[in-house]
């Protein structure tokens, strides 16, 4: 008697996960997590809340449709993705579950589809499995589908699982036959398309799936033998890849992490996209087929990339390290699981011979100096200071600063400002999206420091969105960044502000009277605590412009003013003395500013200013509201760009 092969044993186990669904049509489904069944919408029905009979091992169970894709509109073929999730109200204890695989099978890879058929006895469905091959991908119904070729795909297989012999996991759900009663095959919907259903249902399902397989090894014991059997003579490049066991262990831990907010619009603009790019190699394109709804989706999308070169950390392992580092820093809610993740990635990296690289990844800085941001810069052309070059970076840490595009050609100032604005939306999308407040740092020469970046409306389809209300927009003085000799006192003043209430530190500077440049320079030299200034007008308006120059050279890291305002006069006609001595009687701006910032700390100031901009738009809208036109100069000396030449080697069009 011939001994069963590893594949035949896995195929038998696949059959034990199969269920029969008696919905709007007869078809199949399969267990993916305790109580959760995946099938086709054209089998179960498309209306959430509908009750559906589900049969497993000849026993009937009552199921309820949790989510399903929309029904067709006058078409026979249900629109993509034609999927439904059903939960059994009284599920059988101990039932098995398949392992969901997001890998796309290579062409001609062996596949097994499991379902039911009544071709031998009409009206009496019996279990059936079909031996098939992968015919590649196609898009006949609005989304990517897997072609199932080389065998018959009868109607009773609809909603059933498709096993990929290469990976040992279920890679698709049978959707349709190409032609009944022939061996012309059919179509399957990739398992990743489950991310197109209700986000909350999907995340509950996928987390339950990963948790189950972290505790129940029935499937993995069989699939690992299939993979091991087929891996003889495997590509040496796989030596730096995670094995199936390591992936399952990591995903089981990830499933226990707190959920991130998900945008119901299905926009990919979430923190998950930012996490994807933080781990991927520069130049990687964003995932576009399916939204990133959970940490798991980031992990699986990263595993699909070509492996890194030069013995770098696998991208999915780098992402897991980022989660662990973030979790350890986050405190109580994450700490236990984060520590387990940290241990797991250290063990895995050690097996791959990448222990040192992992230690460096885990040790990367956290806190404000390590907060991701978009840094845009406008700087003078070395050949003609009337022209300017524009460049944008994605800042993730002091060791991970990536150019978003080559530096621009030399442009007139108004064109440079416009070009910088045009570059921002795509980078905001990559770094988290318009509605996920991030830090936007704009390094600008004094002639552009008062431009209305906070008022920009960069999303034509959402004209009520302004940059400064959706993102934490700050400006930084180019002049200081291009003069290393000014950096020491700058860093000292920044440290002096650590932990102090900004409202208690603000002083008013106007440049009049005894605040001429020499007097201001002497005051700044004498007092490192002078680190937060309320300017009595725009830095482009004399005499405030003179005071601004001294403040930049003296390392003052934070300043605020009303955009476009001329220097105000003292109401009492008096002479302004050394900054910091008493309040300013010239304008309500200083008094209102101090009151609004009384409890905010240095590192939280950009978010407080963003909230003030939001408050300025709330009804009843008040003329002259502090947040309506406020500009924040917030210049963290720890967040600097790499040094580079002042101008490109040659002038010319952007590459």
Image (cartoon, rainbow, N blue to C red):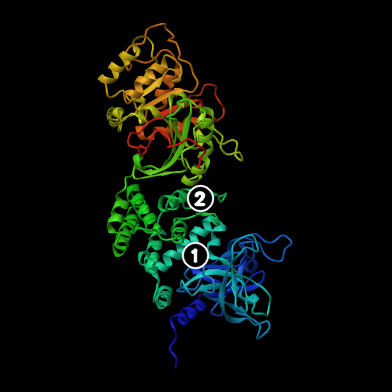
Residue 22 placement (x, y as % from top left)? 63, 73
Res. 59 visible in picture: no
Q: Nearer the viewer, mark 1 or mark 2?
A: 1
Secondary structure type for disc 2: loop
Relative to 294, residue 381 above or below: above
Residue drawn at the location 68% of the way across and 66% of the way down: 77
Marks 1 and 2, how far apart at CA = 21 Å
Relative to 416, residue 204 above or below: below
Give the class, few, some or many, for how many residues have Cα within 10 Å of label 2's Cα (few <14, many ≥20): some
528 and 12: which is toward the camera: 528
Secondary structure type for disc 1: loop
| Residue, disc 2 | 262
Marks 1 and 2, the one that precedes in the sequence:
1
Relative to 276, residue 223 above or below: below
All told, the count of numbered labels is: 2
Q: Look at the image and tell me in which quarter the N terminus lies.
A: bottom left
Q: Quadrant of residue 153?
A: bottom right
| Residue, disc 1 | 102
């Amino acid at each position: 008697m011939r001994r069963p092969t590893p594949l035949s044993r896995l195929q038998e186990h696949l059959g034990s996960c199969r269920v029969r669904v008696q919905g709007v049509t007869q078809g199949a489904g399969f267990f993916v997590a305790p109580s959760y069944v995946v099938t086709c919408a054209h089998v179960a029905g498309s209306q959430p809340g509908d009750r559906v009979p589900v049969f497993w091992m000849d026993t009937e169970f009552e199921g309820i449709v949790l989510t399903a894709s929309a029904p067709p509109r006058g078409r026979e073929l249900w629109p993509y993705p034609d999927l439904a999730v059903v939960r059994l109200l009284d599920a059988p204890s101990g039932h098995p579950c398949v392992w969901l695989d997001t890998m796309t099978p290579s062409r001609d890879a062996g596949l097994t589809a499991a379902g039911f058929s009544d071709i031998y006895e009409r009206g009496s469905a019996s279990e059936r499995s079909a031996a098939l091959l992968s015919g590649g991908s196609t898009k006949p119904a609005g989304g990517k589908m897997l072609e199932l070729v080389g065998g018959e795909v009868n109607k009773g297989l609809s909603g059933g699982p498709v096993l990929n012999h290469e990976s040992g996991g279920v890679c698709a759900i049978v959707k349709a036959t190409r032609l009944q009663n022939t061996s012309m095959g059919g179509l399957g919907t990739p398992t990743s398309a489950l991310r197109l259903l209700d986000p909350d249902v999907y995340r509950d399902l996928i987390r339950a799936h990963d948790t189950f397989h972290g505790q129940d090894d029935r499937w993995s014991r069989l699939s690992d033998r299939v993979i091991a059997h087929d891996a003889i003579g495997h590509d040496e490049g796989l030596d730096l890849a995670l094995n199936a066991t390591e992936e399952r262990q990591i995903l089981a831990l990830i499933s226990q992490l707190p959920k991130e907010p998900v945008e119901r619009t299905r926009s990919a603009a979430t923190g998950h996209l930012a996490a994807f790019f933080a781990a991927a190699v520069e130049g990687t394109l964003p995932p576009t087929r399916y939204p990133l709804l959970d940490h798991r989706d980031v992990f699986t999308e990263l595993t699909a990339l070509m492996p890194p070169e030069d013995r770098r950390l696998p991208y999915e392992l780098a992402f897991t390290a980022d989660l662990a580092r973030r979790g350890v820093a986050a405190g109580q809610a994450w700490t236990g699981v984060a520590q387990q993740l940290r241990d797991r990635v250290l063990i895995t990296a050690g097996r791959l011979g990448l222990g040192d690289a992992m230690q460096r990844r885990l040790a990367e800085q956290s806190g404000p100096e390590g907060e991701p941001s978009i840094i845009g810069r406008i700087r003078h052309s070395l050949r003609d200071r009337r022209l300017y070059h524009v460049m944008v970076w994605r800042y993730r840490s002091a060791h991970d600063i990536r150019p978003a595009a080559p530096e621009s050609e030399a442009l007139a100032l108004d064109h440079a400002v416009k070009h910088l604005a045009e570059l921002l939306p795509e980078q905001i999308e990559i770094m988290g999206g318009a509605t996920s407040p991030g830090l936007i740092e704009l390094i600008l020469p004094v002639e552009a420091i008062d431009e209305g970046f906070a008022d920009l409306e960069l999303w034509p389809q959402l004209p009520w969105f302004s940059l400064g209300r959706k993102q934490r927009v700050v400006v930084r003085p180019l002049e200081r960044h291009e003069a290393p000799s000014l950096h020491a006192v700058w860093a000292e003043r920044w440290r002096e502000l650590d932990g102090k209430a900004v409202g208690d530190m603000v002083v008013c500077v106007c440049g009049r009277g005894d605040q001429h440049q020499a007097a201001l320079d002497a005051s700044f030299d004498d007092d490192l605590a002078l680190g937060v200034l309320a300017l009595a007008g725009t830095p482009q308006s004399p005499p405030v412009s003179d005071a601004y120059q001294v403040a930049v050279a003296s390392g003052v890291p934070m300043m605020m003013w009303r955009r476009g305002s001329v220097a105000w006069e003292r109401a009492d006609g008096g002479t302004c003395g050394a900054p910091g001595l008493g309040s300013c009687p010239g304008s309500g701006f200083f008094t209102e500013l101090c009151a609004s910032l009384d409890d905010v700390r240095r590192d939280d100031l950009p978010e407080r200013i963003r909230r003030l901009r939001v408050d300025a738009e709330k009804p009843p809208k008040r003329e002259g509201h502090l947040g309506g036109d406020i500009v924040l100069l917030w210049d963290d000396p720890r967040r600097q760009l790499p040094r580079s030449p002042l101008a490109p080697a040659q002038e010319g069009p952007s590459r």
